[in-house]
Image (spheres, grey):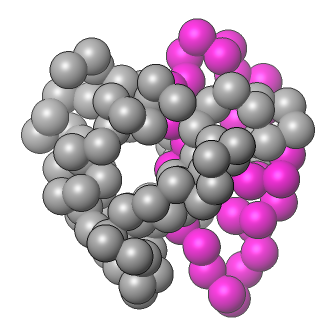
Amino acid sequence: MKKLKIVSPISTKNSDSIELIIMSLQNLKHDVYFFLDTNELLNMDKKDLDIILLEPDMNSWQWLNILKKANQILPEIPVVLFSLEANAENGFFRLSDDANIFIADDVKLLTENLDYIAKS
């Protein structure tokens, strides 16, 4: 498995869901970076990005703005929307065949599918 570079907004750093993923990713020796704002993400070199990790939150729509901008400016970088409360079908799925967006609520299934996500 290739060592992946995964980025997430710093606002999610203390989230229980994201902390759980980060521990799993770091155990697999992947690099996880946090960005301060959308501009920092969009200014990152594309070769330094494999996956963007977002946590949907109905109290803040920041994740949706990031998703929208990332899809416009970095359409080749896959985005994972992760929430322990997502009730995703089978714990992990691709939003649609032509979208580079994945929904997950199961850390094990997410980590098992990282190569698939990064290659999409």
**Magenta-colored stretch includes residue 59:** yes
Instruction: Tell me which segment is drawn in magenta.
Output: 41-69
Question: Which residue is nearer to you in this view: 28 or 38?
Answer: 28
**Magenta-colored stretch includes residue 4:** no
Q: Position of residue 60 (x, y in %)?
A: 72, 80
Q: Position of residue 16 (x, y in %)?
A: 33, 74
Q: Is residue 17 above or below residue 11?
A: below
Quadrant of the image occupied by residue 35: top right
Looking at the image, residue 5 sits to the left or right of residue 45; the answer is left
Q: Residue at x 40, y 84 (%)?
A: 87
Question: Which residue is nearer to you in this view: 114 or 17?
Answer: 114
State the quadrant of the N terminus: top left
Q: Residue at x 76, y 53 (%)?
A: 66
Question: Which residue is nearer to you in this view: 52 or 13?
Answer: 52
Task: Please tell me how many numbered marks the rendered image carries.
Answer: 0
Question: Which residue is nearer to you in this view: 60 or 92?
Answer: 92
Quadrant of the image occupied by residue 62: bottom right
Q: Is residue 39 above or below residue 31?
A: below
Q: Position of residue 81 (x, y in %)?
A: 54, 61
Q: Residue at x 82, y 60 (%)?
A: 65
Can residue 40 be seen from the camera position used here? no
Q: Residue at x 64, y 55 (%)?
A: 96
